[in-house]
Image (cartoon, rainbow, N blue to C red):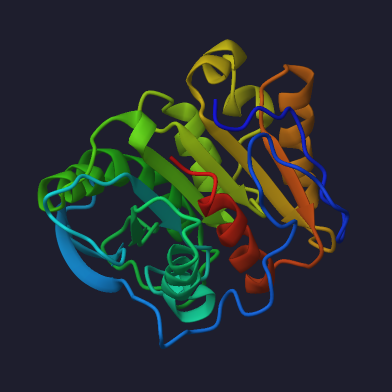
Amino acid sequence: MKVILVALYILLFAPFSWAQQHLDNRAPTGFDQLQANIPHGQIDTVEYYSKTVGTTRKALVYIPPGFTKKEKYPVLYLLHGIGGDEYEWLRNGHPQVILDNLYAKGKLKPMLVVLPNGRAMKDDRAVGNVFDSVKVQAFANFEKDLLHDLIPFIEKRYPVYKDRKQRALAGLSMGGGQCLNFGLGNLDEFAWIGGFSSAPNTKVPNELLPDSEAAKEKLQLLWISCGTDDNLMNFSKRTHDYLDRHNVPHIFYVEPGGHDFNVWKNDLYMFSQLLF
C-alpha cells in the first residue's frame, strides 16, 4: 500500500511526515492561481447515454498536459455536493488550475479526472429545493449510473486503464458521502477513495464497511478529511473511529476551516498527490 497510516491528525499547521511522501501539511500560497507560463490541460464536455436514468447525461473530463492516445491513464472520478452539478468543481474549485500547477512541479502522476453530475435523474439541474427527497434519492441512484453507464463510456472513449488499481473516487460533502458509500461498497471497482467533509448521506460505519478484512486487502488509499469548524465533522469522525477500531489503514486529515471550497481545494491538492 502506497500509504500505510491508521490515522493522521493534522491540526492547524503542525508538521507531519507521510510514509515515503514529502508533502506540505497545507497547500502553499498560489497553488490554485492560474500560471500562464506552464503547460495546461484541457476540459472536454462529453455526453453519454445512461440506461440507469433513461436519458443522455453530461460530464466534464480534465485531460492532463502532455496527453497522448498512445499511453493509458488512470482515472479519478471527482464528485460535487448537494447544491452542485458537473460544473461545481470547475466554477468554485478550479481543479484544472490546481492540477496544472502540480504537473508543472512534477508532483502528480498523469491521470484523467472525470467531473460527473451525481444527481442521477432526468432533470438533474441543481434548481428548486435541492433537499427534496426525490433529488436526494437521485444521489444514491448515481451508484448504478456511475458503475454501469459512465465508467464504461469513459473506458471506451479514452485510453484509460480498466482495473480497480487505476481507478479513484473522491468528492466533497454529499459527493464525499457518495464516494465512501460507493467506493467501500464496491472494492472490486475502486482502490483509491476520498471523502472530503462527507455529508449525512454517509452510511453508518457498520453498513459502510461490514467487511474490514476486505478493505485491508484491497484498498490502496482511504482518505477522510474535514475542517475543524465544519458542523458535519461528526460524520467523518465516526467513520474514522470505526476504521481505527477495526485497524483499517486510512488517513484522517483534519484541517483548519469550515464547509467550503477553501477546505476542498486544499483536500484535492493533498489527496491527488497520493494517487496511483
Image-based side of 237 in relation to 124, left or right: right
- Residue beneath the point at 46% across and 75% down: 97
Name the residue: 51% across, 40% down.
193
User: Viewer-proximal residue, 178 or 158?
Assistant: 158
Q: Is residue 155 placed above or below 114 in the rendered structure? A: above
Left or right side of 212 for 86: left
Left or right placement of residue 165 versus residue 271 in this view: left
Out of 124 and 182, give the one closest to the viewer. Answer: 182
Q: Position of residue 118 (x, y in %)?
A: 39, 57
Is residue 232 something one can see in this rendering?
A: no
Q: Is residue 88 above or below residue 119?
A: below
Is 114 situated left or right of 249 in this image? left
| Image location (x, y in percent) of residue 89 | 47, 70
Q: Residue furthest top?
A: 213
Measured along the vertical axis of the image, is residue 192 above or below residue 120?
above
- For the C terminus, give its image quadrant: top left
**How many circles with numbers are drawn on the protein?**
0
Query: In which quadrant is the N terminus drawn?
Result: top right
Question: At 65% across and 27% down in the image, what residue appears?
Answer: 4
Q: Is residue 246 above or below residue 93?
A: above
**Residue 179 visible from this viewpoint:** yes
Q: What percent of the width, then of the height, locates residue 180?
A: 55, 39
- Residue appearing at x 31%, y 71% in the figure: 41
Residue 187, position in %: x, y? Answer: 43, 25
Determine which quarter of the picture holds residue 25: bottom right
> 253 or 33: which is nearer to us?
33
